[in-house]
Amino acid sequence: MSYEFRELLKKVGSGPHTSENLTRQESETATRLMLLQEATPAQIGAFMISHRIKRPTGEELAGMLDAYDALSGKLQPIASKIPVMVMCHPYDGRSRTAPLGVINAIVLAAAGVPVVLHGGDRMPTKAGIPLIELWDGLGVDWKTLSLEQVHKILERTDLGFVYLPTHFPLAQGLVEYREQIGKRPPFSTLELMWNPYAGESHLICGYVHPPTEGMFRDAFALRGTKRFTTVKGLEGSCDLPRDRTAIIGMARGEVFDRLTLVPREYGFAAKELPLVDDWVDQMKAAMQGEPSELMQATIWNCGFYLWRAGACTSLESGFSQAKAILELGQAERKLQQVICEIEAFRPVLTQQS
């Protein structure tokens, strides 16, 4: 048993009247002891559920991110005029609405905006479809690549994916506790703000509940993260809604602006696309230029992100650029480029196995 961890557990687990918030350093220590499994399973489970009940603070999240940075590998910087866009989607995936994260990333990369996504396999308690299954369906296998190989692919194609079981196994080791406690732990907030890229970047953080955005801002202020965007997206993702106003926060240095995008004002209002069994086939069709509601949803999302990345001068030009990339098959060619780059590593991977 870790007596050091027990003292930290006592602070957060003493009930609504006597529990205390951890300092940034204490939170870093607690997270490190959990990641390294130096705390016992009983201690880790008790901490997770106690911390969920108490609710994490921005300072505690900053400490948790400190521990993640200290114990995880990072994708090394690439040469890019546009900061790498790190899009943080919930690891437990989607269960109701169609996920756009992968097709959005491909279109952005085709426009010269480098994108990094990260996540793992199906996770409790939601166990929705994760990004990695969508990549698998498109024929892109990130699972067997080393972090160094992912870096090379990012360098060559402007796309990268950090796969938790392979690239951050210490964090993967805590996933089973989600099933055991039956609730999302504070680590589910952390995954919406973790940055696995070491160079100049632009974090995109999806969320559901407005207080979460406040936690993001407090933690980023402490850590000196000045370029980020918050999105009240579909099921907590980075995907902009079409059936309601998109609520977006944009940080630029010390300035934080609020942007509300009304889909009907730009001709994109529609019901949200449901998650269906043939979703991968629909993505393939959209990337080959076939008109559909999925194409419209992708243009709506990518037009905004192209503008936000500084790749175009207005939202309207962003929408036009995203539409052209899909209609001309540039997204499909970008997908094939990524597949070919991964296949080039296949002999190396075979020798390693």
Image (tube, grey):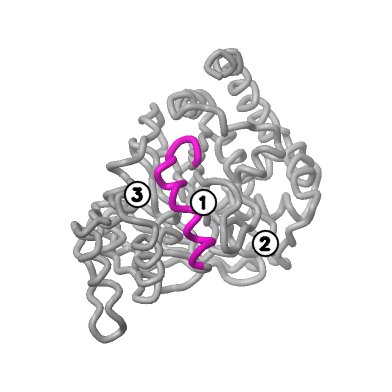
* Depth order, front residue of 188/76: 188
Q: Considering depth in this image, is 119 or 327 the residue closer to the camera?
A: 119
Secondary structure found at label 3: loop
Secondary structure that dominates the magenta span: helix
Of mark 3 and mark 1, the one earlier in the sequence is 3
Q: Position of residue 123 (x, y in %)?
A: 57, 55
Asked if residue 351 is positioned above or below residue 14 in the image, the reply reads: above
Mark 3 to mark 1: distance in Å? 49 Å
Q: Is residue 92 left or right of residue 283?
A: left
User: What amino acid is labelled 3 in the image?
Assistant: Gln
The residue lying at 62 percent from left, 58 percent from top is 127
As drawn, the residue found furthest toward the bottom would be 17
Q: What residue sits 73% from the left and 68% below the top? A: 271
Mark 1: secondary structure: loop
Q: Secondary structure at mark 2?
A: loop
Q: Nearer the viewer, mark 3 or mark 1?
A: 3
In this rendering, does residue 275 appear at all? yes
Please, what is the three-letter code of the amino acid marked with disc 1?
A: Ser
Q: Nearer the viewer, residue 224 or 253?
A: 224
Select label 2 or label 1 by which is in front: 2
- For the residues labelled 2 and 3, the Cα–Cα distance comes to 31 Å
For the N terminus, give its image quadrant: bottom left
State whether residue 85 is above or below residue 141: below
Which label belongs to residue 69?
Answer: none
Three-letter residue code for mark 2: Ser
Q: Is residue 115 visible?
A: no
The residue that disc 2 covers is: 95
Extent of the magenta region? 165-181
Give residue 340's position: percent from left, percent from top: 64, 21
For label 3, the residue is 37
The spot of residue 144 in percent (x, y) is: 56, 29
Residue receiving disc 1: 314
